[in-house]
Amino acid sequence: MDQYGKITKSVRTEDVEREWWIVDATGQTVGRLATQVATILRGKHKALYTPHVDCGDFVVVINADKVVLQGKRAEQKEYFHNTQYPGGGRFRKFRDLVQSKPEEVVELAVKGMLPKNSLGRQIGKKLKVYAGSEHQHEAQKPKQYVLPYTSNN
């Protein structure tokens, strides 16, 4: 019971009903897109959200090569990776990464907003990102998800 005398409902993993959503990233700002996708992946859009349970849905992001950053951020943003060797720090610019691996830009942004533990890794596996408008998840019958917060270009 909580402080008001009501029982708090905690959902179990077996009771979670998952859906598939398609999100079109065309013209979307990377950060605004990532926050909304991370919310769906965690399940915070559902009434029965439980923090310690993976109760989110699957998300298919299409047109990842058409994401944008505002202002000078497209030239200034860098992604850092360490190879674990001495002096092994590697930097990649956003404009280079979006040309070579546009899926990775969206994946890094979304996974950075998930918990940094085993639950976060489990939730991150439900994210499917594709550079173009074609994807291989038609059998799951995904529904179109209209993002409530969109970029004003």
Image (cartoon, rainbow, N blue to C red):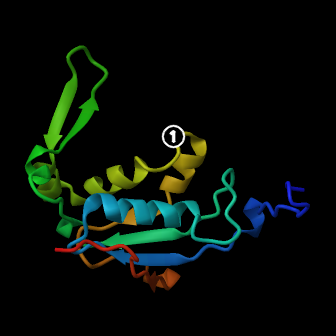
Residue 54 occupies quadrant = bottom right
Q: Is residue 150 left or right of residue 120?
A: left
Task: Identify the residue at horizontal 66%, vertical 53% (top origin).
Answer: 51
Task: Identify the residue at horizontal 14%, vertical 51% (top origin).
Answer: 73
Query: If the image is split into quadrants, where does the N terminus sit?
Result: bottom right
- The answer, for residue 136, to whether it is visible in the render is no
- The answer, for residue 83, to whether it is visible in the render is yes
Residue 147 occupies quadrant = bottom left
Tell me where residue 68 appears, x and y as whole percent: 18, 63
Task: Identify the residue at horizontal 16%, vertical 51% (top origin).
Answer: 97
Location of residue 94 with respect to 80 vertically, above or below: below
Tell me where residue 124 appears, x and y as whole percent: 48, 54
Tell me where residue 85 appears, x and y as whole percent: 27, 18
Mark 1 is surrounded, within 10 Å at the Cα level, by few (under 14), some (14 to 19) or many (20 or more) other residues, namely few
Task: Identify the residue at horizontal 23%, vertical 75% (top origin).
Answer: 26
Check disc 1 and report the residue beneath it.
Answer: 116
Q: Amino acid under label 1?
A: Lys
Tell me where residue 92 appears, x and y as whole percent: 15, 40
Which of the two residues, 14 or 151, is positioned nearer the viewer here? 151
In this view, the residue farthest toward the front is 4
In this view, the residue farthest toward the top is 86
Location of residue 108 with respect to 70 vertically, above or below: above
Query: If the image is split into quadrants, where does the C terminus sit?
Result: bottom left
The local secondary structure at tag 1 comes to loop
Across the whole image, how many numbered discs are drawn on residues?
A: 1
Which of the two residues, 71 or 13, is positioned nearer the viewer here? 71
Q: Is residue 45 left or right of residue 10?
A: left
